[in-house]
């Protein structure tokens, strides 16, 4: 599967010209046909409800992340990958500033309660990436679950899942 680098339209892998915008692909674009770039991923709608378009169900998609680990965690590694975007969102006030954790003053060891917003952002980005790999246009009925592990240190586990769908109108135009 391939996407138009000009308008983001999903195309079959042998397409040399986008049927929607007429963009002709260069040899470099042909070599990167399997990559999912930020523009395509961010065009995928993630919603907790339904969409008012006809669609076909591709299947469930799932992502989980945890801040468990004293020296390194999956969340810490993903925060490094998304650091530039997270800082940009913080500058715009879309994600809160990291806060100091003072729980140790009253006998509670904790790790990263201020990471919930960043974890949510990363999980949505990862759902969009997985949906793009499946050729989806949206993720509907997204749900999340946060579990706290309060034994010793306080860690959290975030699971996010939904149903990847493809709009029917695209299917008619690409076949």
Image: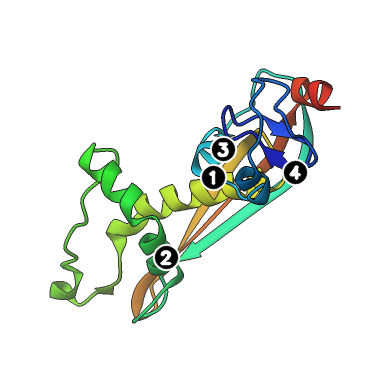
What is the total number of numbered labels drawn onto the structure image?
Answer: 4
Q: Is residue 64 left or right of residue 139?
A: left
Residue at coordinates 33% horizontally, 58% vertically from top-left? 115
Residue shown at 42% from the left, 47% from the top: 121
Q: CA distance from mark 4 to mark 1?
A: 13 Å
Q: Which residue is mark 1?
A: 37
Percent position (x, y) of residue 62?
63, 54
Q: Residue 39 in the image: state x and y as whole percent.
A: 51, 37
Q: Tell whether 11 sits left or right of 127.
A: right
Report the residue that reaches farthest toward the front.
27
Q: Nearer the viewer, residue 81 or 142?
A: 81
Q: Earlier in the sequence, mark 4 or mark 1?
A: 4
User: Closer to the observer: label 1 or label 2?
Assistant: 1
Q: Residues within 10 Å of mark 3 (few under 14, many from 20)?
A: many
Quadrant in the picture for residue 47? top right
Labelled pair 4, 3 in contact (Cβ < 8 Å): no
* Residue on which the image places disc 2: 75
Please identify the quadrant where the N terminus is shown: top right
Image coordinates for residue 28, horizontal then vertical, percent: 61, 47
Secondary structure at badge 2 equals helix
Residue at left 24%, top 46%?
Answer: 96
Residue behind mark 4: 1
């Amino acid at each position: 599967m391939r996407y138009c680098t000009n308008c983001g339209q999903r195309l079959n892998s042998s397409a040399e010209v986008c049927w929607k915008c007429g963009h002709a692909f260069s040899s470099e674009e042909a070599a990167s046909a399997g990559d999912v770039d930020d523009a395509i991923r961010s065009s995928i709608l993630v919603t907790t409800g339904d969409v008012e378009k006809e669609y076909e169900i591709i299947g469930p998609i799932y992502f989980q992340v945890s801040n468990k680990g004293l020296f390194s965690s999956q969340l810490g590694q993903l925060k490094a990958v998304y650091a530039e975007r997270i800082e940009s969102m913080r500058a715009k006030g879309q994600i809160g500033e990291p806060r100091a954790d003072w729980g140790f003053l009253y006998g509670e060891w904790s790790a990263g309660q201020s990471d919930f917003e960043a974890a949510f952002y990363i999980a949505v980005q990862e759902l969009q990436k997985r949906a793009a790999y499946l050729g989806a246009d949206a993720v509907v009925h997204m749900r999340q679950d946060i579990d706290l592990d309060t034994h010793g240190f306080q860690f959290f586990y975030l699971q996010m899942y939904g149903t990847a769908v493809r709009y029917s109108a695209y299917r008619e135009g690409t076949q």
